[in-house]
Amino acid sequence: MNSKPKILIALAAIACATALSGSLAQTLPAGEGYKPVAGPRTLNPGEWPAGYPFADETEAAVAAPEVHHVRYVDAHVRLVEVAYFPGVKGNMHGHPYPSVFAVDAPVPKSTNTPMDPKRNMISVLSKPPEGAVYPICRAAGPQYPHHESNLDSFPHHFLRLEFLRIDGAGLRANWKDWYRYTITGPDRTRLLFEDDHVRLVEVLIRPGETQRSAASPYPAVFAFDAADTRVPLGKGSNVSPPLPGFDTLKCATTGSRTATVTRNTGSVPIHYYRIEFKRVDGDGLKDHWREWYPWMATLKDAYDRSPNTPNF
């Protein structure tokens, strides 16, 4: 069966999900009376679209912890698992930092209401690997406060790798300080997070080093934020265009990979992240989400018994 229509449907779905997903969202008043929270503004302060001019309390894992779950964090990146379980009406929240989305499942019917529709998230999209429907990736800038409600029978589920610092051109002068204590294995990688679904892998090939990477059966999303990063992508991979305002932040999708040898002959490290999918959920999420994500089912059942009071 031709997979091209499925790919187009998946791309259209993720595009809608990051703006106003579903016809219902287009009829809701912006913000629904939400008033910005007062308080310190230390998380990427500055004006939109590069900055986040809102109080720290509006940050997703603080304002909407029912659907944002931090799986890993260091001085450079933070991995957030986003899980809008069926029926949830999420709190108003924002995302201060630029990020890369890694998506491997369809988007349910939902509403996504921005506080200010004129300042919605700026993003660029990469298609899935050749011949596949997933994964899809998106590089995105900071996102103004918004709230989402899941109106369907399965979760809106994806991963978001946030960049607390964009290395950009600064990697050349600062890499010895930023990555002084980064210890990698013989393949120049380190495993940052792993569960039954995904692996987050950091790749750091310092000047003069050689990486011998074994073959991998896992499709993956690559995320890179340094200038002129030479990422060894396999045949059939796709790369997003640069993100306006964050020209060095891009993402790529790739299928299973053959063994490769990469030698860094330059004066700056080759540095990037891989979100590897041990299982691509796809349409199977609709019927198996309780089995695959029992913690999400527990949250859903608790919410049904005692729904949260929205913060707007």
Image (cartoon, helix red, strand yellow):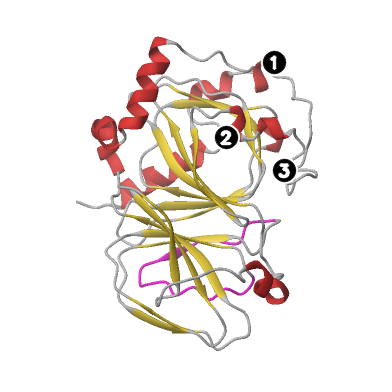
Q: Is residue 105 above or below residue 288?
A: below
* Cα separation between marks 2 and 1: 22 Å
* Viewer-nearest residue: 121 or 85: 85
Q: Is residue 129 above or below residue 30?
A: below
* Viewer-nearest residue: 85 or 109: 85
Give neighbour class at mark 1: few <14, some 14-19, many 20+ (Cα, 10 Å): few
Q: Position of residue 38 (x, y in %)?
A: 79, 26
The numbered mark at residue 33 is 1
Q: Position of residue 111 (x, y in %)?
A: 51, 25
Residue type, mark 2 in image? Ala
- Asked if the stretch drawn in magenta spans residue 79, the answer is no
Residue at x 26% of width, y 64% of height: 217
Mark 3 vs mark 1: which is more N-terminal? 1
Residue type, mark 3 in image? Leu
Mark 2 vs mark 1: which is more N-terminal? 1
The magenta stretch is: 227-244
Q: Which residue is mark 2?
A: 61
- Secondary structure beneath label 3: loop
